[in-house]
Amino acid sequence: MKLKKFLHIAQFEYIRFAKKKNFIISLLSVPLFILFVFGLTLLIVSSENRKSPIGYVDKADFLKDPIPAPQRSGSPNDPSTSEMIPIIPYRSEDEAQKALDSKAIQAYYIIQEDYPETNNVELVYNKRPGGNARRQFWDFMQINSIRNIPREKALRVVSGSNLIIRWPRDSPGGFREFSEKNFFANLSPLFVTIAFFFLILMSAGYTMNAFHEEKENRTMEIVITSISGKEIIQGKVLSILLLSMTQIIVWTAFIIFSVLAAKFMYGFKSVLDLLPAAGIVTKMILLAIPTYIMIASLMVGVGSVATDPREAHQMTMIFMLPMMSSFWLAGVIIKNPDGPLSLLLSFFPFSAFSSMSFRLTFYPVPYWQIAASAGILVLSCLGSIWLGARLFRFGMLRYGKKFNLKEIFSRKISHE
């Protein structure tokens, strides 16, 4: 019977909030932002890159029987597949200038006679050539500067360096790899943490406003006569969790769609390089769920005892500030991810999630530390549900009056 009441409250709260204009706007905010960034990126790339040929005049006879420029997709530093632009040689500047004036080419280079000694090259254009054209001509000159070595080695030199840092698979934190290729995937814990804070702040707004409305219209006084405070807390926390899960699912689906669209439009070789590893995602979920339930339970309890939404928001800063402490101490955590301060923040419930996100980004955190932090968060989650229910009962008994934390623990409150 209690389970039905608990689920009924969660269903009612979920539907009520999901229909609100603020929730719909927040749900669409991330997809709209991604569309804006995606469109802006497409506009910048299309304006920066041009497909017209480029030319050159070789006064130094440096490019006799030249080697073609390598395709940029061969470089580990550049995952994109760029179309090769024709590079046309001209016998004189006049011939090249006529081609430029007729818009047959977008620009031409003049390789001066003293190029072998001075590397003196002049670029002539009416409108600045695209970045893809400039990069390709630079690769063209580079590979022809070292054409006396084997072609495979020359291509490797032109492609540039790609530093890869690996931890062995038998390390305490398991296998990790850092490189330019998976740069965005490595930063995924930080992105998740920022989204997590965004969800908590939105949930705080929903909760505080809801309690204020229920107190104003006396709805809570009616509900409390037929259901216990603990069940109300559980139902409200579940509804907040479901609302956040709805947002996460919609946002994640849209992000995956955007990545696939980027593969199609920009030619990324491997979409998986942009996505976080499954092990990192699992660790973040193990820490995020109990953290969110803990904070949601406290927010519901605080909202029930606050006299108005402004006071409730001020009270929530008591446990929001410790969560943000990891951002203030980010430099220390990144510099010494296995130091005493980093470990302390990782095991303190309110800072555990954000601290672990910084450590997981730059360091293979040992499994036992993940398990210990998750265990502490689960215990804190259960304690927060108990405290939230006690705060709720206290708020109903002392309706409209200020409270202090000492009184919450010292005053006897009738059990549900």
Image (cartoon, helix red, strand yellow):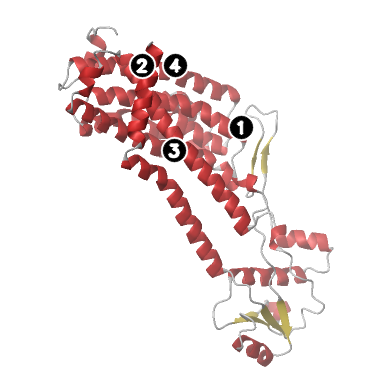
Mark 2 vs mark 3: give the one in front: 2
The kind of residue on which mark 1 rests is Gly
Could you give the CA–CA distance between mark 1 and mark 4, rounded to whole angstroms? 23 Å
Q: Which mark is residue 5?
A: 2
Asked which secondary structure carries label 3, the reply is helix
From the image, which quarter does the N terminus lie in? Answer: top left
Q: Check disc 3 and report the residue beneath it.
A: 247
Looking at the image, is 26 positioned above or below residue 296?
below
Q: Quadrant of residue 327?
A: top left
Mark 4 vs mark 2: give the one in front: 2
Q: Earlier in the sequence, mark 2 or mark 3?
A: 2
Residue at point 25% right, 33% down? 209
Q: Check disc 4 and report the residue beneath it.
A: 379
Q: Which mark is residue 321?
A: none
Tally the marks: 4
Mark 1 in CB contact with mark 4 (< 8 angstroms)? no
In percent of width and height, residue 324 lies at: 38, 35
Q: Which mark is residue 279?
A: 1
The kind of residue on which mark 2 rests is Lys
Left or right: 243 in relation to 165 = left
Could you give the CA–CA distance between mark 4 and mark 2, rounded to whole angstroms? 25 Å
**Of residues 313 and 304, the one drawn nearer to the viewer in this rendering:** 304
Q: What is the crowding at mark 2: few (fewer than 14 residues within 10 Å), some, or many (at least 20)? A: some
Mark 3 vs mark 1: give the one in front: 3
Q: Earlier in the sequence, mark 3 or mark 1?
A: 3
Asked which secondary structure carries label 1, the reply is helix
In percent of width and height, residue 93 lies at: 67, 90
Could you give the CA–CA distance between mark 1 and mark 2, rounded to whole angstroms? 37 Å
Q: Earlier in the sequence, mark 1 or mark 4?
A: 1
